[in-house]
Amino acid sequence: DLQPLVALAFGFRSKGWDVVLISEERSRGIAEEFGLEFRAVAGDSVGIIFEEEYAEMLAKGKLMAMMKETERRKKTWYDQALNDWVETTKDVQMMVSGPLSFHETYCVAEKLGIPWVPVMYGPLFPTSEFPNPFVMESNWFGWLNLLSYNFLYWALWMQQGSDINAFRARLGLDPMTGRRGLMSIIEEKELLVVGAFH
């Protein structure tokens, strides 16, 4: 998931920006390989996909089972990760975020009063033309395709919402109230979104 962000980092750097890659320790190698400053946050949100059992689940589209196991593991490091997001970003002037840390980075950017730009790795804005690729593979019909997006964002928010709002309270921010979490905010505020997919 880091390749599009590394490409953007090179683009920013070519325009004279100082760039820092903030991610889990697993990402240090790619940052160093490309000469990017690196700061680590706790956790391993993608490690599960390298395990055979869960890689098969992902390949078969068993997203809900994957989400449940990921959430169980996340409880062991999430508090430290939140602290790390706050500490490692104190001097940044803009945050460009991949999907695995959308909510956390948005909250920190809001607290710092700096721009936040999400990078989406697929066509993830709700449409009736085709379903959310993480929910269904085959194209059904208009309203069901549209529902597939709203269902995923609702399910993710049901899983993460209380933790995110607790973090927001720690930061002195009002809770998020939309039924689809950050996707509601992205749409309501018409935020700039970078699409990184082929």
Image (tube, rainbow, N blue to C red):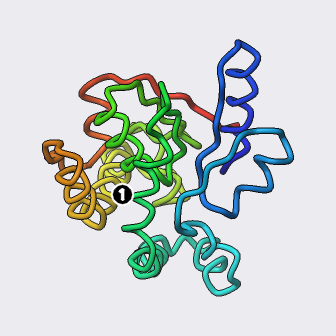
In the image, is residue 146 above or below residue 11? below
Residue depicted at 70% across the width and 37% down the height: 198
Q: Nearer the viewer, residue 185 or 38?
A: 38
In the rendered image, the residue lying farthest to the bottom is: 53
- Judging from the image, what secondary structure is the residue with disc 1 in? helix
In the image, is residue 138 above or below residue 32? below
For disc 1, the neighbor class at 10 Å (few under 14, some 14 to 19, many from 20) is: some
Q: Quadrant of residue 4?
A: top right
Residue 25 lies, in percent from the top left, at 66, 62
Q: Residue tagged by mark 1?
A: 152
Residue 170 lies, in percent from the top left, at 21, 54
In the image, is residue 104 above or below residue 94? below
In the rendered image, the residue lying farthest to the top is: 15
Q: Quadrant of residue 165?
A: bottom left
Residue 91 lies, in percent from the top left, at 48, 32
Is 185 left, or right, of 77 in this rendering? left
Q: Quadrant of residue 138?
A: bottom right
Is 77 left, or right, of 191 in this rendering? right
The total number of labels drawn is 1
Residue depicted at 76% across the width and 46% down the height: 31
Is 61 left, or right, of 131 in this rendering? right
- The kind of residue on which mark 1 rests is Leu
Residue depicted at 72% across the width and 38% down the height: 6
Q: Nearer the viewer, residue 74 or 185?
A: 74
In the image, is residue 135 above or below residue 174? below
Residue 169 lies, in percent from the top left, at 17, 52
Q: Nearer the viewer, residue 186 or 72?
A: 72
In the rendered image, the residue lying farthest to the right is: 33
